[in-house]
Amino acid sequence: MIFSRSGKRRHATHRPRGQRMEEAAAATVEQESALIRFDNVSKRYPGGHEGVSNISLEIAAGEMVFLTGHSGAGKSTLLRLIALLERSTRGQLHVNGRNLTRLQRRDIPYHRREVGVIFQDHCLLHDRTVFDNVALPLVVSGLSHGEVGRRVRAALDNVGLLQREKSLPITLSGGEQQRVGIARAIVSKPPLVLADEPTGNLDPELSREIMALFERFNQVGVTLLIATHDLDLVRKLGKRTLVLAQGRLVDEGLAHG
Ligand SMILES: Nc1ncnc2c1ncn2[C@@H]1O[C@H](COP(=O)(O)OP(=O)(O)OP(=O)(O)O)[C@@H](O)[C@H]1O
Ligand SMILES: [Mg+2]
């Protein structure tokens, strides 16, 4: 016997109550554990070309996942949809509890703060110090001067560049500049970090260092999605790997996950 919302009693004819509650709990956990969910998502660029076509996938909170595929396969497009740098043109996309397909303009800044983005060419401002570059995402957040300083130094410490806060990016090596870009992406402590070919310009040794850094973030609970051509590195790390070809997901890598 169970009670409906109206308070009327009705008989539970199908399954015992305990079982139903377990099923409900499992459904809730499943919903919450998918940090990213694509349901038949496509992105058609102006002019008609589809960057990604009919993508369905899920990434759970706490996963570290690689994204690979030929040049033009749609890796950057997929990341840009998640970061909301592009809008999907079909399907449903949920990220961190938000339906991005229906997101209001005023909610976009909140979403952006929760997604750290790292680009191959790190996009640093060359007339600003390392400190100022990393502080950029915090400038609009209304934090006090002291709090900004504390967070920027924590982020720089994380990537091993605390001593270089006053330097200009041009005086740093390629690997160090990439690490400044990473510090900037994590300074607002986003639960999700996206990286688009983060080691594309680095030699194998530096690439390994960057990946070790990502693994450390992952160990403290950050979810990461990393687009890369570096299949050797991906194989060594043994993480789930999504493969795109001509805008379509051709392998979800579930067997490795
Ligand atoms: N702004 C745009 N307008 C029109 N077409 C675009 C745009 N951006 C990307 N595309 C097209 O969408 C497809 C996917 O591009 P995308 O940049 O996502 O590929 P990618 O897998 O990141 O490639 P790469 O490995 O070279 O970075 C390509 O055919 C590309 O030409
Ligand atoms: Mg790309």
Image (spheres, grey):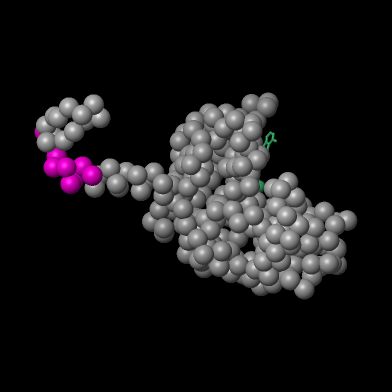
The residue lying toward the viewer, choosing from 8 and 114, is 8
- Residue at 13% in and 42% down: 16
Q: Is residue 98 left or right of residue 197?
A: left
Outermost residue toward the front? 7
Query: Does 20 appear in magenta?
Result: yes
Q: Residue 186: image x %, image y %?
A: 64, 58
Q: Residue 146: image x %, image y %?
A: 73, 61
Q: Residue 189: image x %, image y %?
A: 60, 56
Query: Does 247 appear in magenta?
Result: no
**Residue 201 lies in what quarter of the image?**
bottom right
**Residue 156 lies in what quarter of the image?**
bottom right
Quadrant the N terminus occupies: top left
Q: How many marks?
A: 0
One can see residue 7 in this view? yes
Outermost residue toward the right? 127
Q: Which residues are magenta?
A: 13-21
Q: Is residue 20 left or right of residue 154?
A: left
- Residue at 68% in and 61% down: 151
The residue lying toward the viewer, choosing from 154 and 80, is 154
User: Taking 41 as reference, is 58 above or below it?
Assistant: below
- Residue at 47% in and 57% down: 62
User: Taking 55 as reference, is 25 above or below it?
Assistant: below
Q: Residue 191: image x %, image y %?
A: 55, 53
Quadrant the C terminus occupies: bottom left
The residue lying toward the viewer, choosing from 112 and 84, is 112
One can see residue 121 in this view? no
Q: Is residue 163 left or right of residue 90?
A: right
